[in-house]
Every structure is written in structure tokens, then in C-alpha cells.
Amino acid sequence: MERVLLGLDRRLDLEAAGWKVGAASEAIRLAEGVPGPSPGRIYRRSVFPSGSRIGSEYFINYRLCECEFAFELGVDFRARDKPWAEADVRVGIESLLPAIEVGDSVFEDWYGASGFFGTCLDNGGGAAFIEGPRTRQWQQLDLPAASVDLYLNDYYIKTGKGSAAMGHPLTSATWLLNWLRERGLGTVAGEVVSTGTCTGHCFVAPGDSVRGDFGTLGVVDVRFD
């Protein structure tokens, strides 16, 4: 799976905006039948500001919306022998931003494909990324307890917590950076790491609008044409 994912990234040769962590939540891993989290690329061409309308040309089968906490990196995390600790990652973060990650796959059966890492093979299922407002003074926030409310077409759907991302979004980001490090890869300042869904899976359709309300951190919203 890893060879396919990284090989696909090399062959596409698209401008990268960062990385995302898929299946960071134990509930998602159980639903998808996978043993652990999986990474995926965030590409610059499919990063949108909050309030955007996204056309159908960006998707094949799905518009799977997930509300996530993401970090913008302020330093390079190059490959090295020594593992990154959460303390290393914390001091290297420029800002925190609420986000909606939109998943898609060439496989018509999302959960049926998961048994053999189908969506993991397909860039971790990553298709689009919607950015909310950045916050630099985030270090004192209780991110595991931070909540996000998900709305579909202005109807409340569910509430999630930051703890869904491996117990702490910072833990998830550290896992991703070490996954890259172990493969001789790294990140550069300015890239974003999205840490995994806090609200589970929300499949939507063309014409729908989705909003993630992250409280004091702000709101992220998107509409699908």
C-alpha cells in the first residue's frame, strides 16, 4: 500500500500543500477494517478557503466530509534517524486551523474496498481540503476536549472531539512526521498536516452545503456543485 501511495505521488508530480492522516480514529479503523492509520497527500490544486463552492470535476464517486484540526508547520521536519517527539512537533507548529477534509475514491464501495486498503491505496482517500481561519495562540487550548459541530444544509448532524484524532491532534501529527521520517521523507515549513476526522464520516451529494463549527477557533463551510 505504501509503495503504491508514494509511487502515485511521484508520478502525479503535483505541487504539494501537505499531508493528511486517514483513519486516525479507532472508530473509523473498525468501520473500515484496517489495522492502523494511513497517510495521504494534500495537493495545492485542491485546497480551498472556507466559503468555497467546489465543482464536480474534483470528485469521482464520493464527497466524504470530515471535520479536522490541522497544523501549519513553521519549520522543516527533514528525515533523520532520531524519532520526532511531540515536544519537537509542538514548537515547530506555526498555527492551528480548523478544516474540512473531503474524501473520494475510485472504488465504488468505500467500505468494501477498505478490507484490502482500497482507499489507502488511493491517496488515503484524500480529494479536497477546505481551510478555516488560522490561530497562532493555540498552545494553551485543550485540544482533546475541543469540540466541533457538523451541519449539513444547516441541519445539525453531530458533535465530535479532538480526542478522536489518536487521543490528541498533536499525537496524530507526530505519527505522520515519524511515518515520513522512517521512509527517508520529510516536510517543509508552510506545509499543512491534517490530523484526522473528529466527526466521523459524513457522505454528502452535489448541491449540499457542509459547515464545521469549531467554536472559538472559527467556522469552516463549503458547498458542492
Image (tube, rainbow, N blue to C red):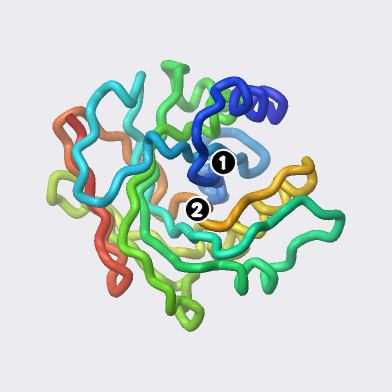
Question: Residue drawn at (37%, 36%), measured in percent from left and top?
Answer: 46
Q: Is residue 62 above or below residue 68?
A: above
Residue extending farthest right: 81
Q: Residues within 10 Å of mark 1 (few under 14, many from 20)?
A: few
Asked where in the image residue 22 lies, by quadrant, the reply is top right
Amino acid type at circle 2 is: Val
Q: Position of residue 194 (x, y in %)?
A: 49, 52
Q: Is residue 102 above or below residue 169?
A: above
Q: Position of residue 174 (x, y in %)?
A: 65, 59
Question: Residue drawn at (75%, 49%), measured in percent from left and top?
Answer: 181
Q: Nearer the viewer, residue 100 or 18?
A: 18
Please give left or right for residue 96 compared with residue 63 in the image.
Answer: right
Q: Nearer the viewer, residue 152 or 218?
A: 218
Q: Position of residue 209 (x, y in %)?
A: 18, 42
Q: Is residue 99 above or below residue 161?
A: above
Question: Residue drawn at (43%, 74%), measured in percent from left and top?
Answer: 136
Which quarter shows the N terminus?
top right
Question: Residue drawn at (67%, 39%), measured in percent from left and top?
Answer: 35
Identify the residue position indicated by label 1 in the image: 30
Looking at the image, is mark 1 or mark 2 earlier in the sequence? 1
Q: Position of residue 157 (x, y in %)?
A: 24, 51
Which quarter shows the C terminus?
top left
Q: Are marks 1 and 2 in contact (CB under 8 Å)?
A: no
Asked where in the image residue 92 lies, by quadrant, the reply is bottom right
Residue 192's disc is 2
Amino acid type at circle 1 is: Leu
Please give left or right for residue 139 compared with residue 212 in the image.
Answer: right
Residue 135's disc is none
